Image: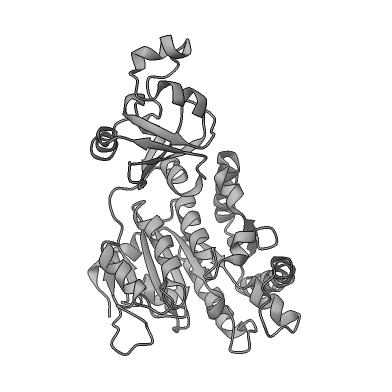
Amino acid sequence: MSDLLRQEVTATAEKIVVKVGTRVLTDAQGKLDLQRMNALANQLVAIADSGRQVVLVSSGAVGAGMNRLSMETRPTDVATLQAIAAVGQTDLMQTYQKLFQEQGRLAAQVLLTANELDDRVSYLNVRNTLLELLELQVIPVVNENDTVSVDELQTTFGDNDQLAGLVTNLLGAQLLIILSDVDGLFTGNPEDDTSELVPTVTSLDETIAGYVQESSGGLGTGGMGSKLQAVRMVTSAGENAVIANGRESEVLTRILAGESLGTLFVAEGKTLSPWKRWLRFSAQTQGTIVLDKGACAAIQQEGSSLLAIGIIGHQGHFNKGDVIQLCNEAGEELARGLTNYNSDELEQIRGHRSEEFQQILGQCPYEEVIHRDNLALV
């Protein structure tokens, strides 16, 4: 069964990011499921052969490493997990390379950490590398660099959902497909017979959040909370996403044919520029600026620049050019932006008009603390 909305979303997606979880890639014994991985590789190659560009974000390094080292219980200390990931990543990529080569394609390993996507120069280098690989008709296989990324190994649901969202925005891909061991978003715990699959979501509002909270563990079975965070990254940037069961036969082929598999999350609002996607999702904030009600309204409703007169206070030490979090008096984040002034200068000019900067600082290089072109709403 298909519908017109799904057909339109999938037909117009020229660049696609596919994220596959560990539970999809491994069997009941924790070994890499070669049959399923082969089916996945066949579908990815078919997508590429159709003229579309596809990037794979793959988990599974720790699971593969545990199997190679004959470990039945997942260790809890970071050093051991990092060592296991190093062993498993080799197996994972060897398997992908073999499967893709059998279909006449090459795979390329791309290991990333949050630091690489935080730094603007590194971010652009990663983007250019991925785009060049796609032009060379190579299928990039992206994974969190587990051996150095501590947060990835300490997070219950993993950061690869978030990584997939970041990669989707980095590339400006029109569609993110997250393959998990659940059929999509349910109105409650997927194991509860009273829960129903939600076929389409047009807004990630409180109702949707409630569905996840009603699932076991508070964040949902199969890490649905993490997946929805990744989906929000994508839909709020103006792109679409699907969460579906990676164990379904020909799941990617059927999704891209417009079949009603999983849950479709429809883009919300206008498409964000690449610059504002980096500001909003990838750059790490170095401090916080607190705004009065007038400044909050000007930024949110009018799309204005941030002026010093609307600033109540700030937190943290930051430099000119750092990315700063903008909050209201209640501490709610409203936006992120690139500051024209450091924290010491800001302390002096906050609450003042720009024509007073010359007298206060001895200069007035910028009228705005953050120009609207360098500001992204959240």
Where is residue 279? Give x, y as percent: 45, 42
Can you see residue 127?
yes
Q: Is residue 185 shown left or right of residue 27?
A: left
Image height check: is 333 above or below 223? above
Image height check: is 208 above or below 349? below
Where is residue 235? Give x, y as percent: 35, 57
Image height check: is 180 above or below 284? below
**Closer to the camera, 213 or 248?**
213
Residue occupying image coordinates x 74% and y 80%: 68
Quarter of the image where one finds residue 297: top left
Where is residue 1? Give x, y as percent: 27, 80
Q: How is the image coloured?
A: one colour
Image height check: is 72 above or below 184? below
Residue occupying image coordinates x 66% and y 78%: 74
Give the number of callouts: 0
Can you see residue 342?
no
Where is residue 331? Give x, y as percent: 37, 46
